[in-house]
Image (spheres, rainbow, N blue to C red):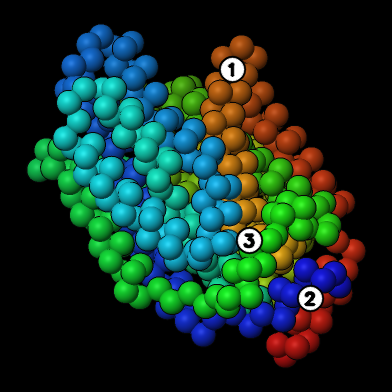
Amino acid sequence: MTDTQREASARPGSIYWKRNLAVSLTGSFTTIVAMTLLLPFLPLYVEELGVTGHAAIVQWSGIAYGATFLAAALVAPLWGRLGDIYGRKLMLVRASLGMTLTISLMGMAGNVWQLVALRLFVGLAGGYASGSMVLVATQTPKDRSAWALGVLSSGIMAGNLVGPLIGGALPPIIGIRGTFLTAGGMIFLAFLATILLIKEEKSPAYSRAAKASGGWKSIADKRPVIAMLATGMLLMFANMSIEPIITVYVAQIVPVETQVTMISGLVMSAAALGSILSASWLGRLADRIGHWPVIAGALAVAGLLLIPQAFVTSSWQLIILRFLMGAALGGLLPCIAAIIRHSVPDSAAGSILGLSVSSQYVGQVAGPILGGFVGGHIGMRAVFLGTSLLLVAGAAYAWAVRPKNAQTSNMRASADRA
């Protein structure tokens, strides 16, 4: 066992970890809902801000939507590093306050340039969900960390699922600008709960170690961390590479044209629902048998499930296969965060977890671009089969680079709990 692993094993976790998890779960769900509820009406709002012409509306909607992820990918390691030094709770307070102000101001935008600038600022100032991952990972006892991160991941994915539904229902009732103000109010409640309820335990010696730590340089064995950065990017790539072609693919197997959009929505939601239901269970399994077997197994199963998706003949087959694939992938994010948390010194955990978030954003951006290109120029089956090959290769890579003492440590931890 390395010094880093021994340090992680020695920390019992904060006595407030359950309260911190509950507040982080609620705050992450709330902020993700507020971030994603604009998706159904974003083109309408862009048009309301003075943009004319179908092509221009689509282009500006894409720019406004992507601006947040671009900015977030750039600053995630910085916020992680500052969280290591000054405290993870402070980063959550900063993120929730910044998002409260920025999303409320979106409802007062006068032109599309202001909207894009505010979306950029949300990415720069936000990061509540990723910050919660860092807080929960470092404050939870080691033998419960994957389960806790799985519960948090379920809340984040539920926010992604519920947000667009709320965004489709609220504007007809209170208007688009009123919807932004309501979203800002939701995040303000998360801001108050974060200040009043989260308790972070951090010693002065820990703060000095974080300031002196070289971040990446402080990691003794970098191979597990590199593997997890690659796995996070691959996970998001696999999830998003199919998104651009889903509607067109569904149109080929659904005979009734008026049902295409509804069934496409069900196909997209099925994977998210599977992940929500499986994340905490897979996290608990990883705490018991080890994170590396769960990661390798999940990637392999998801890769194999992509093969029949390329040859479905009816919509219900695709919905079931997407649900099963989402269930297989649901435990990856908590396991990735748990392995990073156990592979780096606590004083550098925020920096490296922030870097992990950035790598996931890279996959989130690259997936739709490459998926759309391959689907348009080679064929839609090639997207499924190519992504399947990448996931199986990722499973083999994760299994090959796993630490040799991981299985022994997991068996010892299981015996200690027994």
Q: Are marks 1 and 2 in contact (CB under 8 Å)?
A: no
Q: Which residue is mark 3?
A: 211
Eye-nearest disc, 1 or 3: 3
Say what secondary structure mark 2 lies in.
helix
Q: Residue at x 37, y 41 (%)?
A: 122
Q: Against 12, is 377 above or below?
A: above
Give the residue pinned by disc 2: 6
Q: Mark 3 is on which residue type?
A: Lys
Q: Amino acid at mark 2?
A: Arg
Check residue 373 in the rendering and tell me which mark sits there, or answer none: 1
Residue 230 horizontal side relative to residue 114, left or right: right
> Does 357 sit above or below residue 50?
below
| Drawn side of residue 21 relative to residue 26, left or right | right
Quarter-of-image position of residue 220 = bottom right
Q: Quadrant of the C terminus?
A: bottom right
The percent position of residue 87, horizontal first and vertical second, equals: 50, 65
